């Protein structure tokens, strides 16, 4: 559980998608018209995450054990 940021309109679920490496996944997000809003950042346990918004405004996160290929 995380504290809701003031900029968020209300409570929400955040979906995480596992990817092979976070760097190439971020590049694919940009090519597809999405936006990275935070990251990539390493979190406890050695995983890398990045938060994103797709072109329709849906928020989601990416997660990988590898920063780059």
Image (spheres, rainbow, N blue to C red):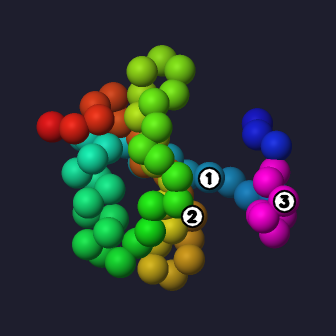
Residue 39 rendering spot, x and y as whole percentages: 47, 47
Q: Main secondary structure of the magenta part?
A: loop
The residue indicated by pointer 1 is 14
Q: Quadrant of residue 64?
A: top left
Left or right of residue 24: residue 6: right
Instruction: Tell me whether circle 2 and circle 1 mark residues in contact (CB < 8 Å).
Output: yes
Q: Few, some or many C-alpha atoms within 10 Å of disc 3 (few <14, some 14-19, many ≥20)?
A: few
Dot 2 crowding, Cα within 10 Å, few <14, some 14–19, many 20+: some
Looking at the image, tell me whether mark 2 or mark 1 is earlier in sequence order: 1
Q: CA distance from mark 2 to mark 1?
A: 7 Å
Instruction: Find residue 57 and report its horizontal and vertical position in percent.
Output: 56, 77
Q: Is residue 44 above or below residue 14?
A: above
Which residue does the numbered mark 2 point to in the structure image?
A: 59
Examine the rendering and report whether any part of residue 40 can be seen: yes
Whole-angstrom CA distance, mark 2 to mark 3, is 16 Å
Whether residue 21 is situated above or below residue 45 in the rendered picture? below
Going from N to C along the chain, the mark reached first, 2 or 3, is 3
Q: CA distance from mark 1 to mark 3?
A: 16 Å
SS for callout 3: loop
> What is the quadrant of residue 59 in the picture?
bottom right
Residue at position x 44%, y 68% in the image: 35
In the image, residue 25 sits, relative to residue 19, either above or below, namely: below
Q: Is residue 48 magenta?
A: no
């Amino acid at each position: 559980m995380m504290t809701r940021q003031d900029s968020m309109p209300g409570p929400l679920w955040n979906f995480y998608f596992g990817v092979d490496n976070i760097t190439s996944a971020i590049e694919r997000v940009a090519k597809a018209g999405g936006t990275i809003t935070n990251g990539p950042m390493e979190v406890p346990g050695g995983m890398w995450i990045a938060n994103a918004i797709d072109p329709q405004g849906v928020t989601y996160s990416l997660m990988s054990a590898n920063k780059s290929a």
